Image (cartoon, rainbow, N blue to C red):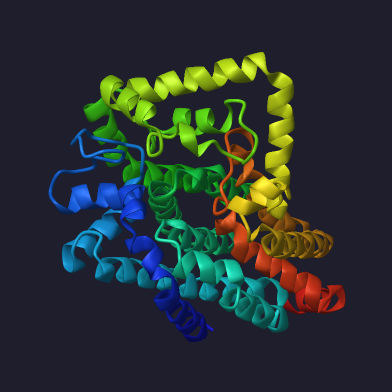
Amino acid sequence: MVLAALAIRLAVIPFVYHDWTDPFVLEHWAFGLVARSLASGHGFSSVFSPTGAPTAVLPPVYTALLAGIFKIFGPETTASVIAALSLNSLFSALTCIPVYLLAKEAFGSRIAKWAGWGWAFSPYGIYYAADWAWSTPLVTLEVACLFLYAWRLEKSCRRGEWPLYGALCGIAALTEPVTLSVLPLLGLWTLYRRYRQGKRWRLQVLSAALGGVAVLSPWVLRNYVVFHHFIPVRSGFGLELYIGNSGYSDRWVNSALHPNHSDAELDEYNRMGEMDYMHHKLEQAKAYIRTHPGWYAWMTARRVVYMWTGYWSFSHAYLKEEPLDPPNVLVDTTLTVLGLIGLWRVFRGDSSMGMRFAIVLFFFPLPYYFSHPETYYFRPADPLIVILAAVAIVGRKKFSAAQQASG
């Protein structure tokens, strides 16, 4: 499965990598800008313009990986772009392993085969690996692995595994902080299950917390020293809330208000500095939300629909900018329906496992409902949706039989 998935993704790269060598794209490739600065010895800086000012807009893990690629192949060269897409393809292909193992241990071999091959040929898995030089494939692999790890910890007697879980959660948070919306909850659910079973849990929760704090602390300390503010991982929430909540509704986000696309915003960012600029954007967004509660409620509902179906609008003007939306809506909605059917069947067979899936599906997209979504934001949950879809396709009887056999 891994080899087939990798071969498919690598075969796609020659047809799509040119998009990332376009000068306009490179000029606005946030990870590329910071990685270039890091690779050249200037630290985490220059996210919006070559000012040399420090930044905390992006987390460090994927940026550092990209900087390493730039060190070897040159900053933002064709070779480095292909290397980055190839690395992402490897991350995506390796995700077959936790998908297969989780499905096999929880639901049986037949569902595991459906899920593993389903991920290998997943259109989203292929696209966001071969044509998306971003951290999404790595975050996807981390979430799938840590979901499996947290479940296995329910029966584990090894104390050393808990600080390791916390440390790995810290690495995932430094890759993409939204993972903190689900990974600690998965650990807490495991601890609750251990408590109900009369197993030790107090020392486990402390050691996991210490493991996570140990990994996160250097980055948090760096941010405090540089910016004199407590910034857990990223500094850009104010901007993200602002560009999604300013009265614009033709698309899910008003990119024209982003410093990458607005000279006025870029000038304000450079003039005020990152922290003051982000605080100002946060206040602007909050002021608009307070004065337009009806608009905000309606947009929040639209964001929920968009995250689960890919649908925003079928107007002529919108489809002119997003011509692939109709087939995407079909694929996305189909996966959602199959995933929810599978979730219902899992709950009927094993409510504890069903709760684990529900935690991810409910909490992972939650921050984006209230700020703004992007097409790739929910994709790290796709491997779990693929597993649930396999449960739906194979059928409840086979799932129940597998549960009885494993029990």
Residue at position x 31%, y 35% in the image? 220
Which image quarter: residue 342? Answer: bottom right
Q: Position of residue 327 (x, y in %)?
A: 70, 64
Rendered position, 303 above or below 393: above
Rendered position, 69 above or below 376: below
171 or 164, which is in the foreground? 171
Residue at position x 43%, y 47% in the image? 173
Residue at position x 30%, y 53% in the image? 32
Residue 154 makes an appearance in the image:
no
Q: Position of residue 164 (x, y in %)?
A: 40, 56
Q: Position of residue 59 (x, y in %)?
A: 36, 45
Apparent side of residue 255 relative to residue 404 in the rendered image (left or right)? left
Residue 184 makes an appearance in the image:
yes
Q: Quadrant of the N terminus?
A: bottom right
Which image quarter: residue 293? Answer: top right
Q: Position of residue 211 (x, y in %)?
A: 38, 47
Q: Quadrant of the C terminus?
A: bottom right
162 or 53, which is in the foreground? 53
Which image quarter: residue 86? Answer: bottom left
Residue at position x 58%, y 66% in the image? 124
